[in-house]
Amino acid sequence: MPLSKKLKILLQSKKFIILSLIFILLYILIFTKIITYETKLDLNDNTYSGKIESFIIDGNKLSMLVNGEEKVQVTYYIKTKEEKEKLQQSLLIGDQVILKGEFNIPYNNTIPNIFNYREYLYNHQIYTTFSADTITLSNQTSFFNQIKTNFMRKIDKVGSSSAYLHALILGEISYIDNDIYQEYQKNGTTHLFAVSGMHVSALALFLSLLFQKIHLKELIGNTLIIFFLLFYMFLVGFTPSVLRGGLLFIFLLINKKFNIHLNTLVVLYLLFLLLALINPFYIYDLGFIYSFTTSFGLILFSKKITGNAFMKLLKISAIAFLFSFPITVYNFYEINLLTILNNVIIVPLVTSILFPLTLITFILPFLNSILMIGIYFLEWLTKFLNAFAINLVVPQINFIFIFLYYIGVYFIYKGKFKYFLFLVILTITYKLFPVLDRNSYVYFLDVGQGDSTLIVASHRKYVILIDTGGKITWEEEEWEKKNKVYDASRNTVTFLKSLGITKIDLLIGTHGDIDHIGYAKNIMKNIKVKNLWLNYNMVNELEKELLDINLPNNFDKLPIINLNKTIREDENESSLVLYFNLENINFLIMGDASKEIEKNITNTYSFAVDVIKIGHHGSKTSSDKTFLTKFKPKYAIISAGRNNSYNHPSSETLQTLNELRIPYFSTQEKGSIEYVLKDGIKKINFYPP
């Protein structure tokens, strides 16, 4: 028997697939979980040097991946418009750069179930970040890196469509306006802007048709396609999804040329083994997971993709949705059920018109205005479709759900279509799990230099959010403005959805300062709010925006008493001070009330306090000793941002708490703080633990 035939039989045998799968899973487990890695750099050093692997200039922010002794994520804030222009002209991928500044170890997520930046960097073998104060460039790089940088610069010079050229050609989404990108996220089409197998296949198909048109020999044409794909993968940085798309196309060409006749699924599996062996951390890359999972589904169901062009596209979209559903809800807790139809409408527009037009515009920049017409139409169409979105929120699922889900998909593949109902019942069951929870929860969320308290009653009878946090922003010049602006309100929204919360029964703003209600409007855009309660002083601009929504204040499921009746121009003096009892635990939320307000409460009220949210982030203007002595809470919570400019909490407040032997937890040190309640305090959790 010929060697090639023996190899084919071996690679397609169940024994090989099972044994190799066990091996690769153990390999991944050992090298990503059992073996741990940490930086070998001296974090006290204030200098670092290495080669620039990638960079992005967004407004006044320069982000670079620099590889010296190890990979380090670098941030530098540009000081002037002239400096920005100079950097845009002089930065080169592959440049040797000398940096002065400060090393930092990134934080884990301090709100449960949200994106973990530290884990993300770790999975990309990056263990530290660097805040640069100065940058010195050598302008010495390789020929290919110069080509790559010049490619990026040429895109920058195209004009108003440059952001979409970066996205559709290079897969770099950072240049797309943040609000627009969120619209794409809502309708499930962001995959169009992450260069993947779709882009690779489109390019390869275009080249194949071109070479056939000019009657180029098949061997020469395929060789040129392979070299082009390798160069394209280099341009986009060898991202896992591009590697999957490009290498699969190359492997299938080889499979056909040398008559190996391996099943396409086997070729895909061998590629998975190869990439996992090269870098086992690929298994945690979302693009890698999506790419292989949807490719597996499309190849598996390929014989069922029949009919006219529309029906084929509809079936492809449905299969991709079916296989990616648990990945999406596991990571984002929400999915638009109309994603299938959205893709049927938008994918042809992007792949058949906009993507080819971006390539042509790159070569012929004067076509920029024509491309912009298509972009404006795409953005309008996206917003129009989102008006009809049917969003399904599924609380945090586990691997049991994922396992059972794909078992159901397997039976659907076998023709047992009644298992669609099984998938629906499985999803509804997980969606309803929180209603069965008999515990109540109070979360003191880490929102930086701000306040936010979430109350979740047993069996989800009600949800209350007291304050939202917020961040003061400063007016920036046009050149300083960023496309990607970090909005911490999205963390709160994501966390709420991870709990399966789609509505807030009562939103309370203790007062109108931005660090207390600054994120309210953004949260209300994403989570339905039924009742609103603000303090009683003069309405400022932030409060007016909320009151314009015209919500009632009829909530009565949890008696909450406001202890501060003072109405003054000063927001802090008029801050609501809230007292309530939940599961036989008395809570006192002080807002930003001052010592004078505390004195009034001391003279007027007498009750037990179990947990107090310390006033004004632990400032010395609050937490009077007499006040704390009278109510003597069992626990105190301080919400304050790390390294905040106000030096909250003050040493005076901490000294008072220590003298009175009141245990306290600060969001600075503990992250978000969770009280699990059931007829008392059942458990206290911290995030990160």
Image (tube, helix red, strand yellow):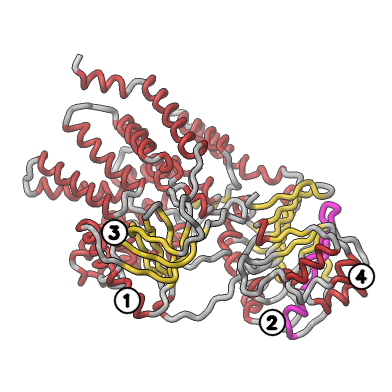
Q: Position of residue 651 (x, y in %)?
A: 74, 70
Q: Which residue is mark 4?
A: 605
Q: Residue at x 83, y 52 (%)?
A: 583
Q: Is residue 570 magenta?
A: yes
Which mark is nearer the camera, 4 or 3? 3
- Point out the residue furthest to the bottom here: 569
Residue type marked 1 = Glu
State the separation of the CA atoms marked 1 and 2: 43 Å
Q: Earlier in the sequence, mark 3 or mark 2?
A: 3
- Depth check, mark 2 against mark 4: the one in front is 4
Tell me the residue that label 2 is attached to. Answer: 539
Q: Nearer the viewer, mark 3 or mark 2?
A: 3
Spatial CA span between label 4 and label 3 = 68 Å
| Mark identifier at residue 85 | 1
What is the span of residues highlighted in magenta in the rendered image?
Answer: 569-589
Task: Tell me: residue 426, above or below residue 684.
Answer: above
Q: Alpha carbon of mark 3 to alpha carbon of mark 1: how far?
A: 19 Å
